[in-house]
Image (cartoon, rainbow, N blue to C red):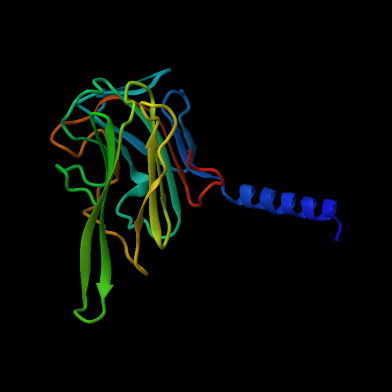
Amino acid sequence: MSVLAVAVSLLLCLAKVLAQCSVDVSYDLASTSPTTGVGYMEESPVGSVTFSGSGATFTGTGMLKMYKFSAIDWRGIHSLLFNFQPTDPTLVAEVSLMTNDVNDNAGSFMITWSANQVKLKVSLRLWNTTTLQFDTRTDVQTITGLDLTVMTNVLVTIESSVITFQAGPLTVGGYPTPVTIALKHDEHIEIVGWDPLIFGKGTATPFSGVLQSFTHYNCIPIGFFF
């Protein structure tokens, strides 16, 4: 096979991969038509979050609920991307950005921020065939040195063997190397209650700032991380 034929074949394979990894659902919160894909988003309470060309503005009183992601254990392959900018980037209190439980720090899949950092917390479980019970553990990964005075991107991928997490930009410019959480065979995120995926609540200090967009894939796009 000629070099040209090989190159064409590789390009066709790449195009096929790219076509297979398409957006599952996307909320462009700076748009008047924010939803792509199948998903239902609720503002709670009504009028507590305002929408404009800059995105969804939270003032500490409201939250957004994404019911597509209610009571799931995130098995399979997932990619999540959202971006935010806090009203006061110097705040030292831990503030929930995203969680699957509205109660204070009770989520098993949480992303929080405080001054110069973003944190991922996952509570994992694995069936123990000896005790016939679930073994549980909690893993927390923190990315520091972030410039929260600008729109900050948060990226998470979940696969059967690893969870990968990145946030940026850094105050020195650029993005940090993604951090990972290794998973055992069939280990997965614990389901807690029946809450949907929630933005804006989940810690004692609620979120105040702008959420610009949220996107979910049931695959990992090529070049997903910065």
Picture coordinates of residue 6 (x, y %)? 79, 55
User: In the visual, does 181 lie left or right of 226?
Assistant: left
**Outermost top residue:** 53
Of all residues, the one furthest to the right in this rendering is 2
Q: Position of residue 31 (x, y in %)?
A: 46, 24
Q: Residue placed at 40% from the left, 19% from the top?
A: 54
Q: Position of residue 34 (x, y in %)?
A: 45, 30
Does 134 sit above or below residue 53? below
Residue in the foreground of this view, choosing between 46 and 95: 95
Residue 153 picture quarter: top left
Residue 171 in the image: x percent, y percent? 35, 26
Q: Pick the residue in front: 155 or 52.
A: 155
The answer to which of 118 and 17 lies nearer the viewer is 118
Direction from residue 172 to residue 117 in the image, left or right: left
The image quadrant of residue 91 is top left
State whether residue 29 is above or below residue 72.
above
Residue 158 horizontal side relative to residue 106, left or right: right
Q: What count of labels does the image hold?
A: 0
**Quarter holding the N terminus?**
bottom right
Residue 182: which quarter of the image? bottom left
For image coordinates 35% across by 48% down, the residue present is: 69
Q: Work out whether residue 57 or residue 220 is closer to the camera in this orientation and state it.
A: 220
Q: Residue furthest front?
A: 172
Question: Residue drawn at (68%, 48%), measured in percent from left and top?
Answer: 15
